[in-house]
Amino acid sequence: MNYLIVIPALNPGDALIKYVDDLQSHGYQHILVVDDGSSDRHRYIFDEISAKTGCEILRHEVNMGKGRALKDAMKHFLSEYAGRDFGGIITADSDGQHTVEDVGKVARALSENPDSLILGARDFNAGNVPPKSRFGNKCTVVALKLFIGGNISDTQTGLRGIPSSMLEKFSELSGERFEYETVMLINAIHSGADIKEVPIETVYINANSETHFNPLKDSVKIYIVIFGTFFRYTMSSLSSFLVDYGLFLGIYHMLTASSAATERAVWIATGASRICSSLFNYTLNKKVVFKSRRGPITLVMYYILCVIQAASSAALVNLVSSFGAVPVQAAKILVDCILFVISYRLQKGIIFKTDQ
């Protein structure tokens, strides 16, 4: 099976020419290099590569970002290679991080698993990994696992084998720069796609000085992608609390103004406000937060979760506070924060689960 090797590049060094030569000498004859707005003084590199048989250059007149470069390469594949004997594309970075041998590992894995997304996974415990790269990648791995799901050890790898069947969907995703690779993973996880990792060599040349990744700006974009749904979930919960509290005060005031007993008024106001606020929260979560198209069964599942969550809260608060060292007030905050995240995962992964 043939694969198109896709290499997005911005102001690459001469080593890219040798890298393309090495790829071709190992049998990868079809290579697409995306010139993502490189300066004129690097033009000779792309000209030399384009002169090689089987090599193409896709040029952006201005820098548009790695995400856009990958998506344009996918669209190029779909228009020029679809229907031919090509199983998909293999993406690799232009800075020398991905050895030809590792490209081969991904190609073999994709050949053996033609409907799977293949990720070349680095070992961030290796001694040559710069501390900031090790810390950043491990934080992203934890965040993705906690708030999205999946069990991916290298979320930012640029060495990926993408089968033809996934290219049309991936080419339409949001994200123009480095955050796009995270969007791709999240979409694959949400849609239930099979994701496989193959171990690759961990290469950092000159402490990764050639990278165009901005640790601050690009990391913020990546975490916005990861935390986006959870942020909407948090805002939904906060607005539901305000609805609940506002209705409680209003109903309680009306009842006590008409001479109703205080205790009875509290029970009635609590019940009415909780029913209204929970329906409000359910609707927000279904329509806005998780954008689910599932049917009425979600309402039943949602209220079952509410009952279980309330019972779990009471039981766990009693358990934690029974040790004596933790006051009930503190135990309540701790337990409910943990249950809040668990509820998010259950609503996202089970109740409102939908293909994206």
Image (tube, rainbow, N blue to C red):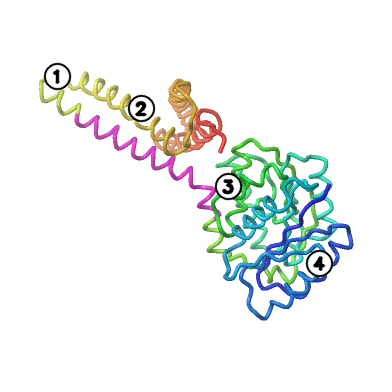
Tell which of 58 and 120 is nearer to you: 58
Q: How crowded is mark 2: few (under 14 residues within 10 Å), some or many (20 or more)?
A: some
Q: Mark 1 points at which residue?
A: 260
Distance from label 4 to label 1 (Cα)? Answer: 82 Å
Q: Name the residue under label 2.
A: 279
Percent across and percent down for residue 107 are 81, 49
Distance from label 3 to label 1 (Cα)? Answer: 50 Å
For the record, the magenta segment spans 222-250
Q: Residue furthest left?
A: 258
Q: Is residue 285 magenta?
A: no
Tell which of 273 and 218 is nearer to you: 218
Q: What residue type is labelled 3?
A: Ala
Q: Nearer the viewer, mark 3 or mark 1?
A: 3
Quadrant of the image occupied by residue 36: bottom right
Q: Residue at x 56, y 38 (%)?
A: 356
Distance from label 2 to label 1 (Cα)? Answer: 26 Å
Q: Which amino acid does label 4 sit on?
A: Tyr
Task: Kindly indicate whether the residue at mark 1 contacts the one at mark 3 (C-beta within 8 angstroms).
Answer: no
Q: What residue type is labelled 2?
A: Leu
Q: Which amino acid does label 1 sit on?
A: Ala
Q: Mark 4 points at which residue?
A: 19
Percent across and percent down for residue 77 are 70, 53
Q: Mark 3 points at which residue?
A: 143
